[in-house]
Image (spheres, rainbow, N blue to C red):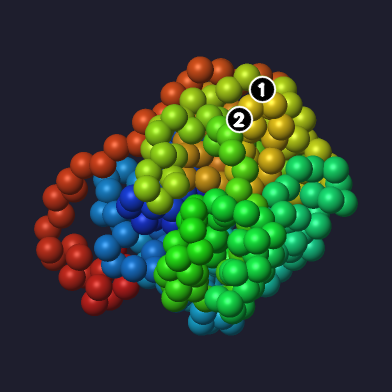
Amino acid sequence: MSETQRPIVVALTGLNAIDSPGPGVAVARAVRDGLQQPVRIIGLAYENLEPGIYMDGICDKTYQISYPAAGPEVLYNVIKAIHEKEKIDVIIPNFDAELYNFITIAPRLKALGINSFLPSFEMFDARDKLNLYDFGQKHGLLVPKDKAIYSINDLVQLGEDFGYPLVVKGKYYEAVVAYTLEQAQKAFYKISAKWGLPIIVQQFIDGTEVNIAALGDGEGNATSIIPMKKMYITDKGKAWAGITLEDEAMIQLAKKFVAVTKWRGGFEVEIMKTAKDELYIMEINPRFPAWIYLSAGAGQNQPASLVKMAMGEKVPAFTSYDSGKLFIRYSWDLIVDVSRFQQFSAFGSL
């Protein structure tokens, strides 16, 4: 096969297509749809029951990698070993918790020939849950008041300061709306046991949940912005159905965030829109959301555009998208022979 015929090799994480899904399956689908050349998708999985490992048409091959807690050096060595077999062109991490490690090793991966398109540590920290309120104050963006706590005893005072209901959030994932002190305490124990400390307690904002998926070019420009309204929300707070919106205020908010941070890569803004049309930023996630395939369906394929940008191509900013495009997530039973599960479990690849 000549070099011009060689498929572009894209490695990605986030294959846990469960009730709280990772973005990996959606990113893989969008990349396959959006590149005008052959693509080989290499899945990077943390656990042996991530559905994306076994789904037809998602990954050409999948490897098991170390958990983020193992640190950047272990991750680098694992990726390097996979690269020696697969010749990876672009790598797309899709989990918040793994981004620190990937940003750390990005220059070394680049030296191997593995491209990425990630924010800097400065960008990454600016939108962290612990810093988001101060970021909003500095740049004139509405962000609910919050406080990071390390002791459950602090909940009593915060209940008085913020009033009930209030939101109890993990430093990486999960959020619970608590209507009483007892509910807040229960959420504190549950979330801290899973994600550690600190716990973020946030002022509750009443309104409609809307989201933005966007892609920044690293120079202060937004290549793509897709606003979406959640139409069905699971008990874990995940969008199970949503529709693209025509909302100039949301687009301008995303453009402002990209301009002040010079954001590089994909991100999601979670917003509460009040009855007065105020846009409160609840979170800014530093990667594509699980519903990112909707961007391809609406005419702005963000994952495919990111791959092109990572490879050094200049991608012009999209100027239009289809509003009224609906996504509906669903689940079905995938039947897999146990030998495939055993192979991945025993050898760490499939």
Amino acid at dot 1? Asp
Vertical relation: 291 (above or below) 165: above
Q: Is residue 223 left or right of residue 246?
A: right
Q: Which is more toward the observer, 128 or 72?
A: 128
Where does residue 115 sit, x and y in percent of width and height? 64, 57
Can you tell which quarter of the image residue 106 is in? bottom right
Query: Residue placed at 72% from the left, 54% from the top?
Result: 145
- The residue identified by callout 1 is 247
Mark closest to the chain's N terminus, 2 or 1: 2
Q: Residues within 10 Å of mark 2 (few under 14, many from 20)?
A: many
Q: Which is more toward the observer, 220 or 279?
A: 279
Q: Is residue 333 left or right of residue 251?
A: left
Check if mark 2's residue and mark 1's residue have beta carbons within 8 Å: yes
Q: Is residue 3 left or right of residue 57?
A: right
- The residue identified by callout 2 is 227
Amino acid at dot 2? Pro
Any part of residue 160 in sight:
yes
Any part of residue 38 in sight:
no
Query: Residue placed at 55% from the left, 76% from the top?
Result: 152
Using the numbered discs, state the Cα–Cα distance from disc 2 to disc 1 in whole angstroms: 7 Å
Secondary structure of residue under mark 2: strand
